[in-house]
């Protein structure tokens, strides 16, 4: 039996076992996928277990995405740019690390709003943390002409823009208003939206009526940012699809079958939120 995992600390909240378990049953595979609590101190020992052949691979979530990077034998170039690994694959060459968050982000928008990136001139990313890195790479790879990176601490945005490179304009959240009128996509990569929190001064009315607003937060499914955008008639995309789509490449690498993100799977996971 092929075994895969998701590790984190804490890990009880993870929906990954439900997602992968659904696909395993759907395809009738002799396989398993389990959530395993691994502390930061216990990470090297767990990776040794993986190297020993106990698993075919697995997912990595907070707080291990950066730490596991150094424990891989090979890291995918895009994961190296993002500086974080969320998917491990055991191969004859050793332990390989990937980051599928950018695939999840693009897959979610592609499925929900086909053609969303056609002619997209400017996107605004809110936040400059780990998630923003993956979104920056995704938008850069998709060929967006101008990416505005805004963070409460503008210096952090400046540093990330310099590191990632490409058509990135960094600044503080207070710079949003001067960029909004020609923005076609707004992406929230921060934790703002959880527990009902919202941005203090983010006037969505400054955006074009054709703009898209998306949030990587999926609990709640409709964040205050998305609710405000919908109230103004803007197109919105929630963060659940990103979670579902980022799981596809790992499943295919471990089990040799490419699963589909279906409405039924979404409803199954959504029922647990």
Image (cartoon, rainbow, N blue to C red):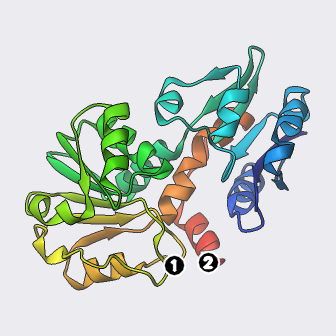
The answer to which of 166 and 260 lies nearer the viewer is 166
Which residue is denoted by mark 2 in the rendering? 273
Tell me the SS state at disc 2.
Answer: loop
Q: x%, y% of residue 267?
A: 58, 73
Tell whether 199 sits left or right of 91: left
Q: Secondary structure at mark 1?
A: loop
- Residue name at image x 55 percent, y 48 percent: 246
Residue 6 lies left or right of residue 162; in this view the side is: right
- Give residue 269's position: percent from left, percent from top: 63, 70
Q: How would you rate the neighbour count of disc 2 (Cα within 10 Å): few for under 14, some for 14-19, many for 20 or more?
A: few
Asked if residue 257 can be seen in this view, the reply is no
Answer few, some or many: residues within 10 Å of disc 1's Cα (few below 14, many 20 plus, some between 14 and 19): some
Residue for badge 1: 220
Contact (Cβ within 8 Å) of mark 1 with mark 2 = yes
Q: Is residue 238 left or right of residue 264?
A: left
Q: Where does the image place residue 86, in percent across and percent down from the top left?
A: 63, 42
Q: Is residue 48 above or below residue 113?
A: above
**In this orientation, which residue lies closer to the viewer: 48 or 107?**
48
Q: Position of residue 9 (x, y in %)?
A: 76, 57
Q: Which mark is residue 113?
A: none
User: What residue is drawn where x is 84% and y is 54%?
Assistant: 36
- Quadrant of the frame with the C terminus: bottom right
Gap between marks 1 and 2 measured at Cα: 7 Å
Q: Is residue 76 above or below residue 183?
A: above
Which quadrant would residue 111 be assigned to in this image? bottom left
Above or below residue 81? Residue 104 is below
Quarter of the image for residue 16 reads: bottom right
Name the mark nearer the viewer: 1 or 2. 1
């Amino acid at each position: 039996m092929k075994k895969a995992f998701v590790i984190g600390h804490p890990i009880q909240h993870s929906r990954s076992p439900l997602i992968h378990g659904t696909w395993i049953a759907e395809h009738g595979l002799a396989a398993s996928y389990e959530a395993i609590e691994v502390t930061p101190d216990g990470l090297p020992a767990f990776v040794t277990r993986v190297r020993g052949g106990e698993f075919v691979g697995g997912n990595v979530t907070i707080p291990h995405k950066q730490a596991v990077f150094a424990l891989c034998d090979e890291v995918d170039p895009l994961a190296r740019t993002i500086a974080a690994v969320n998917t491990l694959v055991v191969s004859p060459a050793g332990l390989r690390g990937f980051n599928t968050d950018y695939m999840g982000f693009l897959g979610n928008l592609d499925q929900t709003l086909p053609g969303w990136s056609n002619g997209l001139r400017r996107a605004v990313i809110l936040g400059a943390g780990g998630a923003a890195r993956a979104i920056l790479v995704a938008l850069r790879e998709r060929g967006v002409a101008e990416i505005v990176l805004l963070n409460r601490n503008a210096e952090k945005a400046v540093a990330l823009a310099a590191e990632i490179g490409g058509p990135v304009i960094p600044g503080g959240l207070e710079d949003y208003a001067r960029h909004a009128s020609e923005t076609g996509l707004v992406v929230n990569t921060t934790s703002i939206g959880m527990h009902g929190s919202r941005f203090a001064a983010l006037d969505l009315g400054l955006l074009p009526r054709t703009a898209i607003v998306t949030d990587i937060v999926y609990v709640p499914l409709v964040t205050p940012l998305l609710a405000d955008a919908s109230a103004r008639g803007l197109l919105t995309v929630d963060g659940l699809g990103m979670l579902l789509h980022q799981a596809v490449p790992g499943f295919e690498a471990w089990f040799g079958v490419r699963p589909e993100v279906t409405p039924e799977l979404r409803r199954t996971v959504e029922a647990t939120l």
